[in-house]
Image: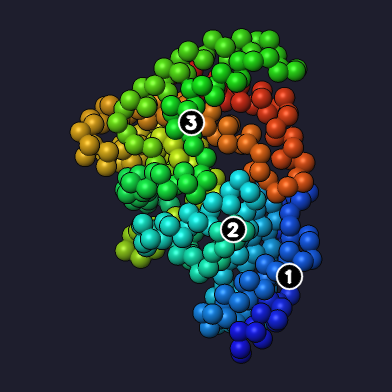
Amino acid sequence: MTLAEAVDQPLGRITETDTAGFDAVTPWAEDAWRAEAMAWVAENLARRGLTPAADGLRVRLRPWSVLVRVPVRGGSCVWFKANPPASRFEARLAEALHTWVPGQVLAPLAVDTERGWTLHPDGGELFGDLAADPQAWQDALLQYAVLQRTVAAHHDELLAFGLPDLRPALLGPVFGMLTHRTGGLDDQVHGALKRLAGRFAGWCAELDASGIPATLDHSDLQEGQMFRAGGGSYVFHDWDAASVAMPFTSLLVVARVVRERFGDEAPAVLARLRDVYLEPWTDDGHSLTELRRLADLATRVGPMGRAVRALAPGRMFPGSELDLRAMHSVGVQEGLAAACGLMLAD
């Protein structure tokens, strides 16, 4: 089949469209965009000598991404992903990570950095599909920590790609926005935020002065974002929520997932995972005791960074009601206040 024939050929019959209950406004609904995107996929498959199967196309639509599973002849598949403006950096980031930490991320088959399109191979067996025991988590987190330390050298490039800048030095002043009166914000919540501002600024200052460099934070490191590779190693993917931040904020999502998986054993598992994850930073002269303190502060400060990112425009595709409500909803503001309240827990 020639390249031109492959581009003209439909990618196959759609057998599943998953919206997860979202009334998602995405460009997939536009005939011209959909045709252009699928032609791009077909062209890049043809460049690699791959032919799409006759059917089995699965489409996953969310307000924050379009994901299409495209089966190819021979039993494999590829994945097309399109990002909205605020996470369009993912295509460029995926390409760069493949160069900086080869073998630790999915190597993209093709990227279009202007349109925020990425074509990936199938990653294989998901970490979440394994009987993931504490040792598997330890191995994965240790590898992730080393990845973060390596990528820290590319701090300026990450920011140039457009990743959100959530470094502690910038989060301190941002917190003050929540101390301003917002229509409908409860007086008690408003007062609690105002009283917390000074402590929050102190935590940010301590993290900023710690000597731990800001680096890539996956921001959603859970079992569905890792594949098992050969030799007991793992491959990380799905970077659309990533940011440049204090690295230890990555422990926020890990802690939630581990609590859900390990139940009563979770406190002991988490303590061990934290220490394994922190161990690579002892190479810089930090004691484990110091690093534990910084990890505790990072998980107190981290929710604010995630809140700031969630409130930023462009996180959803243009036209999404969710994107508009995120900028103005008092409910979001109250949710942020609740997250900040969690920071006070000892």
Q: Residues within 10 Å of mark 3 (few under 14, many from 20)?
A: many
Q: Position of residue 125 (x, y in %)?
A: 48, 63
Horizontal and vertical percent position of residue 58: 68, 66
Q: The residue under label 3 is which amino acid type?
A: Gly
- Observer-side mark, 3 or 1, equals 1
Q: CA distance from mark 2 to mark 3?
A: 30 Å
Q: Residue at x 71, y 18 (%)?
A: 182
Report the amino acid beneath label 2. Answer: Glu
Q: Which residue is mark 1?
A: 35
Residue 114 image label? 2
Position of residue 105 relative to residue 312, above or below, is below
Assess disc 1: are there few (<14), some (14-19) or many (≥20) residues with their C-alpha within 10 Å of its C-alpha: some
Query: Is any part of residue 260 visible from this angle?
Result: no
Nearest to the observer: residue 206 or residue 186:
206
Residue 93 position in % (x across, y down)? 48, 54
The answer, for residue 281, to whether it is visible in the render is yes
Q: CA distance from mark 1 to mark 2?
A: 17 Å
Q: Which residue is mark 3?
A: 302
Considering only order in the chain, which callout, 3 or 2, is on the residue closer to the N terminus?
Answer: 2
Q: Of helix, strand and loop, which one carries label 3?
A: helix
User: Label 1 is placed on what type of residue?
Assistant: Ala
Quadrant placement of the N terminus: bottom right
